[in-house]
Image (spheres, rainbow, N blue to C red):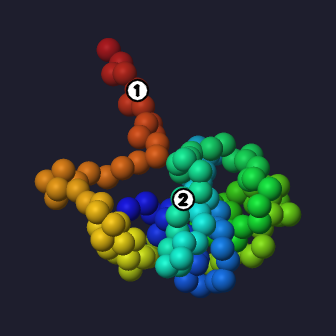
Amino acid sequence: VSSLAAVAAEAFARSDADRVAVVQDARMNEVYVGLFERDDAGLPVLRGKEEIVAAGALLFPGDEYAAAGAGWNRYPELKAMNQGNILIQVPVAYPDARHLLELGENAFAAGGGVDPASLAPSYLRTKVAEIPAAKG
């Protein structure tokens, strides 16, 4: 279950927004971004093909969104660039376990699931830092 989707789920629970742009700090002047729409059950559905890692100077599509996630405050220039599309900022910085569980239950009920022996974390960016070669 995506942590960005969990932030979106809480943003939907706390507001009447139909779309939310979740931005989290990915460090190294990048952000993790997920654009979500509210489905009929009030849960987030990813808008577009995937969540992404992007450089801090990112413009969002022409639609209006609620903003959620700690990345908006970490990169105020990103918020300023997109101010015309941000309806409100919902005070949800990080994922809450109850929303992760809610999304997991929903995915399982829809036929999704993974054999517990196959569970592994999934990261948008797997290469965070390189270990320098040993000096001889």
Q: Closer to the camera: disc 2 or disc 1?
A: 2
Q: Residues within 10 Å of mark 1 (few under 14, many from 20)?
A: few
Q: Residue furthest top?
A: 136
- Residue 38, position as x, y percentages in the image: 58, 72
Query: Which residue in the structure is indicated by mark 1?
Result: 132
Q: Is residue 32 above or below residue 131?
A: below
Any part of residue 110 in sight: yes
Q: State how far apart marks 2 and 1 are (Cα).
A: 37 Å
In depth, the one of 35 and 125 nearer the eye is 35
- Residue 9, position as x, y percentages in the image: 51, 74
Residue 46: mark: 2
Amino acid at pointer 1: Pro
In depth, the one of 98 and 135 nearer the eye is 98
Relative to residue 132, is residue 55 drawn left or right?
right
Q: Earlier in the sequence, mark 2 or mark 1?
A: 2
Any part of residue 24 in sight: no
Q: Is residue 57 above or below residue 129?
A: below
- Residue 81, position as x, y percentages in the image: 82, 55
| Quadrant showing the N terminus | bottom left
Task: State the SS at label 1.
Answer: loop
In depth, the one of 84 and 132 nearer the eye is 84
What residue do we see at 65% from left, 63% from top? 21
Amino acid at pointer 2: Leu
